[in-house]
Image: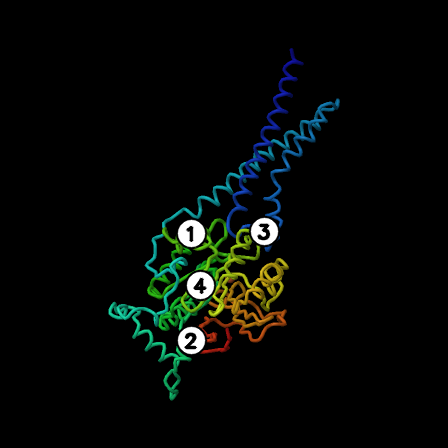
Amino acid sequence: MTDTINAGARQLSRRATLIAAVAALALSATMNGYFYSLQGAQGFYVWYPMLALKVLLFMGLAPITLAVLALPLEKLAQKWIMRALRWISFIGSILVSLASIGLLAFLIVVPRLGSMEPARLDLVNPSQGIVAQSAQPAAAFSAGNGGTADAQAAADKRAARPGAAPLSPLDRPLLRLAFSSDPHWGADTANVGARTDILKGIAAERPDAFFMLGDTVETGNSVTQWNFALSDLEALIPSVPLRPILGNHDALFGGQYLYRKAFWPKGFTSDSGSPYYWSIKAGSATIVAIDLPWGTENFGPRQRSWLEKTLAAADPRKPLIVISHSYFYASGYKDPKTGAPWYDHYQNIPAIVPLFEKYGVDLVISGHNHYQELLSHNGVNYAIVGSMGGLPDPEPTYRSPWSQWINVGGYGWLDVNVLPGRLALTFRSETGEARQSATISY
Ligand SMILES: [Fe+2]
């Protein structure tokens, strides 16, 4: 009788151990699969090689391994080793299951906690394109907000220096664009004054569109930080056509949900079908956004073939401008904590630059590094504009061989005026002074 009970308990224990281990493996795989499916998560693993992330990835394998190792030990006369292994496996299964459920809930629930009111912003819908104020019908003027004559007069005033002759048609911008990146709302280290000045300066300029190239917030799953960003944007640039893209910080821990809620309202569509990469017909220019929050982790075959098709189909008479969060050529430094090389991007350059060179991209504008920099290589120009308020990166220990100019420690934005046959670039400080100018023929 006693033998029967012992055999039953042993049988039950083996089955329970295996069932618990398989359940833990399934839960861990589900959690990791969901995390990996999120924007920027794979890049987080690649660019932050922390032990804790590796443990998350492989923890589901530990209980099942121990449970299987315990099976042949059943034949030993000494049963305590087998029992100990089963118990370790069983307790491990419970811990792994709880951790997986907790993390899955964290990724799904936290971005959805709290409320986010849609901000009154003039968001650019990529499928609708951008209309230059100088190309708008005269009726727009009577609306009194961003009208043709007003905008043109403002453009003339800005372009003219004291004592300069009036603008000739060749100097009159066909399209006026502004770019900046990495404001990092919610970061204690961000410079609120500089960020505010930049937004005020851009609002005063009234460009045809302002592109904010990612890292709008410090931690993407924080509704509070997105609300800070939206209320400032609404207060400071409510009527500037605005198109943000997703940065690695915006994407953190399920932040893509809040990015879409903030900047991709219902009804917005794109030629790629994705809210993260698309092209915009902007009248006298073609603007193409690529989804590179960290590097090429989200740049799969679908995005690659769309990009190649889009670049090939671009009108060769118009300038072709590419925007992305992470950069291609850039000066920078080796991260002291992780060893990550924050300069000439080892993933983006080999994967995508050949397409830029093949299809005649004129200008690539990115953030991610918190500098202002201008570079040029093989006929393609690269601008870094990660200067919208996030903590400036340290003095570069690596200077890209293709760097032409760099500003370290400053804040500001980049104006790109599309003129007949050329692009006029002006890197500005947070108060609007021109730090560096350049002209690119197209
Ligand atoms: Fe950043």
123 displayed left or right of 108:
left
88 displayed left or right of 280:
right
Residue at image x 39%, y 80%? 169
Sequence-wise first label, 1 or 4: 4
Q: CA distance from mark 2 to mark 3?
A: 38 Å
- Which of the pair 312/193 is nearer the observer? 312
Name the residue type under label 2: Gly
The numbered mark at residue 432 is: 2
Dot 1, how many residues are within 10 Å of its Cα: few (below 14), some (14-19), or many (20+)? Answer: many
Image coords of residue 45 (percent x, y): 58, 51
Dot 2, how many residues are within 10 Å of its Cα: few (below 14), some (14-19), or many (20+)? Answer: many
State which quadrant residue 417 falls in: bottom left
- Which of the pair 26/288 is nearer the observer? 288
User: For numbered disc 4, what is the local secondary structure?
Assistant: strand
The numbered mark at residue 258 is: 1
Considering the image in quadrants, where does the N terminus appear?
top right
Residue at image x 60%, y 35%? 92
Q: Write down the residue under mark 3.
A: 45
Residue 36 seen in render: yes
Name the residue type under label 1: Leu
Image coords of residue 346 (percent x, y): 63, 61
Sequence-wise first label, 3 or 1: 3
Sequence-wise first label, 3 or 4: 3
Q: Write down the residue under mark 4.
A: 212
Name the residue type under label 3: Tyr
Sequence-wise first label, 2 or 1: 1
